[in-house]
Image (cartoon, rainbow, N blue to C red):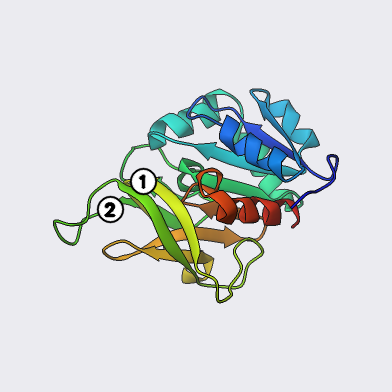
Amino acid sequence: MILEKNHCLVTIPDLSIGNLAAVANMVHRIGGEAIITSKPTDLKNAQRIILAGVGAFDTGMRALEEKGWLEPLKKIKNEGQVPILGICLGMQLMCRSSEEGKLPGIGWFNADVKKIIPSNSEIKVPHMGWNTVQVQKSNSLIPDNAEEQRFYFVHSYHAVCTEPQDVLASTFYGCELTAGISKQNIYGMQFHPEKSHRFGLSLIKNFLEI
């Protein structure tokens, strides 16, 4: 899983909403280059963008707006040339809204983020730990083959898509939850590839090779 060092530059916006070093380290492990930056102007050199974070929805949206990331990210998305991957909160920010907050989301997906409602007393929230995912449509990141795909989740909210064709993968935790979404050059994963060992390594490798 080694790429040439100059094969791909991944830009990771620093929104001060999580530890991004693990994401950058995984990119480095497969031979890519990653920079964690607080300067939106660095996006002009990005070949890939990873929007990652943990925490509250409104905190993430305020950081995007106040730190100057929102407009350049929207421009890059609309140009359609640079793949963008959202991880955990980063994926949720791509949706229209969240029950966790009051601010509107970026709105790249016709989806709303809802709190996980346990179907029985054995279902604990947050959903934390390893879970298998089921691929719902052909995609470039998660192979649809006989091997079980397992990823690490930590979340209390989940995306509900208005357009089913945007659902890339799902997982079952008391009920079916959206695990991944995609549309054109944008992708979102509710789980943490950077904590998912070889499965996450494969996903990030595939993202760099799109």
Mark 2 secondary-structure assignment: loop
Residue 23 in which image quadrant = top right
Give me the residue at 73% from left, 51% from top: 208
Q: In this view, does 60 lie above or below 159?
A: above
Q: Residue 155 carries which label?
A: 1
Is 46 placed left or right of 160 in the picture?
right
Q: Are marks 1 and 2 in contact (CB under 8 Å)?
A: yes
The residues tagged by marks 1 and 2 sit, at their Cα atoms, a distance apart of 9 Å
Please provide percent x and percent y for residue 38.
64, 23
Name the residue that disc number 2 marks. 116
Q: Which mark is residue 35?
A: none
- Quadrant housing the C terminus: bottom right
Task: Give the amino acid at mark 2.
Answer: Ile
Please provide percent x and percent y for residue 178.
42, 61
Please provide percent x and percent y for residue 64.
54, 31
Any part of residue 160 in sight: no
Disc 1 residue crowd, few under 14, some 14–19, many 20+, Cα 10 Å: some
Disc 2 residue crowd, few under 14, some 14–19, many 20+, Cα 10 Å: many
Count of numbered circles in the view: 2
Task: Give the amino acid at mark 1.
Answer: His
Q: Which of 130 and 65 is in front in this view?
A: 130
Please provide percent x and percent y for residue 183.
60, 61
